[in-house]
Image (cartoon, rainbow, N blue to C red):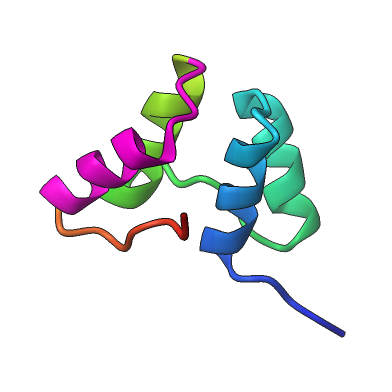
Amino acid sequence: SYQPTKVTVIAFALALQLSTASTENLLKSAGYSLSKSTEFDLIIRYFLDRKSYDLFQINEALFEFNQPLLPV
């Protein structure tokens, strides 16, 4: 009955270096999706679309926009 948070699912997808589509499928299986209107989701989508999976670089961008950071 464990329900991971959206941030945990995204961190897992990045660790596995999944494509944007595969990340969307993984998020959907956990009951989440990437929104096209929230800053956090747009930043994550930006890095996924460019196949850039460096958590430190992603967290730097998230920090710049005062968004929650991903676990490292």
Left or right: where 36 falls relative to 13: left
Above or below: residue 18 compared with residue 13: above
At x 75% / y 40%, what residue is drawn?
A: 25
| 51 horizontally vs 64: left or right | right
The residue furthest top is: 50
Q: Position of residue 36 (x, y in %)?
A: 39, 40
Residue projecting furthest to the right: 1
Q: Is residue 8 above or below residue 10?
A: below
Residue 6 horizontal/vertical position (percent) = 57, 62
Displayed quadrant of residue 14: top right
Please determine whether, in this image, residue 2 is positioned above or below residue 7: below
Q: From this viewpoint, is residue 69 visible?
A: yes
Which residues are drawn in magenta? 51-64
Q: Residue at x 40, y 45 (%)?
A: 41
Residue 4 is left or right of residue 39, and the answer is: right
Residue drawn at the location 49% of the way across and 28% of the way down? 53
Q: Is residue 38 visible?
A: no
Whether residue 72 is in magenta: the answer is no
Predominant SS along the magenta part: helix
- In-front residue for pair 10/35: 10
The residue at 34%/40% (across/down) is 56
How many marks on residues? 0
| Extreme-bottom residue of the structure | 1
Task: Tell me residue 57's x, y (percent).
Answer: 31, 34
Specify the quadrant of the image occupied by residue 20.
Answer: top right
Q: Is residue 59 magenta?
A: yes
- Using residue 51 as the reference point, say whether residue 64 is left or right of it: left
Foreground residue among 66 and 30: 66
- The quarter of the image holding the N terminus is bottom right
Quarter residue 9 falls in: bottom right
